[in-house]
Amino acid sequence: MREVTVQPQWNEIVLICKDCKRRNDGPKKIKTRAVVAETKTVLRDRRSRPRVVMSTCLGVCPKSELAIAVAGSAAGPRVVTLATLTEVGKAVLLLLA
């Protein structure tokens, strides 16, 4: 096997848990794809846009909330939970600050 080194176009990654929605006690008013779309909209004007992806369980499992994590930032990995779609912009900017 040959090892190849590639430099990605992004330096941070935003992980949005899609398993939170599937739980019985998961959020009722938030759709994961809507959170991904809103996150991308919020980050559109940033100079260095992070990669936004849906992931499997992040291991936080907040009751009636959705977990979002950021990896690769200078502050290290961080996680925040959301109860409503209106909190997405503020939460993502807080994580990336």
Image (tube, rainbow, N blue to C red):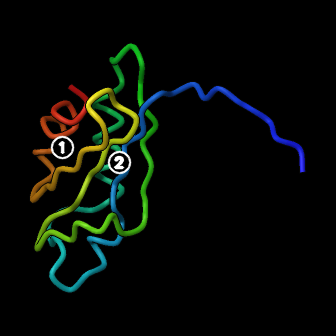
Reading the image, the residue beneath label 2 is 36
Q: Position of residue 28 (x, y in %)?
A: 15, 72
Image mark count: 2
10 Å crowding of disc 2: few (<14), some (14-19), many (20+): many
Which residue is painted at 31% across and 60% down in the image?
32
Name the one closer to the observer, 85 or 26: 26
Give x and y (percent) for residue 33.
Answer: 36, 56
Q: Residue at x 34, y 54 (%)?
A: 16
What residue is drawn where x is 29% and y is 49%? 69
Q: What residue type is disc 2 on?
A: Val
Quadrant in which residue 64 is drawn: bottom left
- Residue drawn at the location 33% of the way across and 61% of the way down: 17
Residue type at mark 1 is Val
User: Within 10 angstroms of label 1, few (less than 14), some, or many (20 or more) residues?
Assistant: many
Q: Which residue is mark 1?
A: 88
Q: Quadrant of residue 62?
A: bottom left
* Name of the residue lying farthest toward the top: 47
Seen in the picture, residue 36 relative to 29 is either above or below; the reply is above
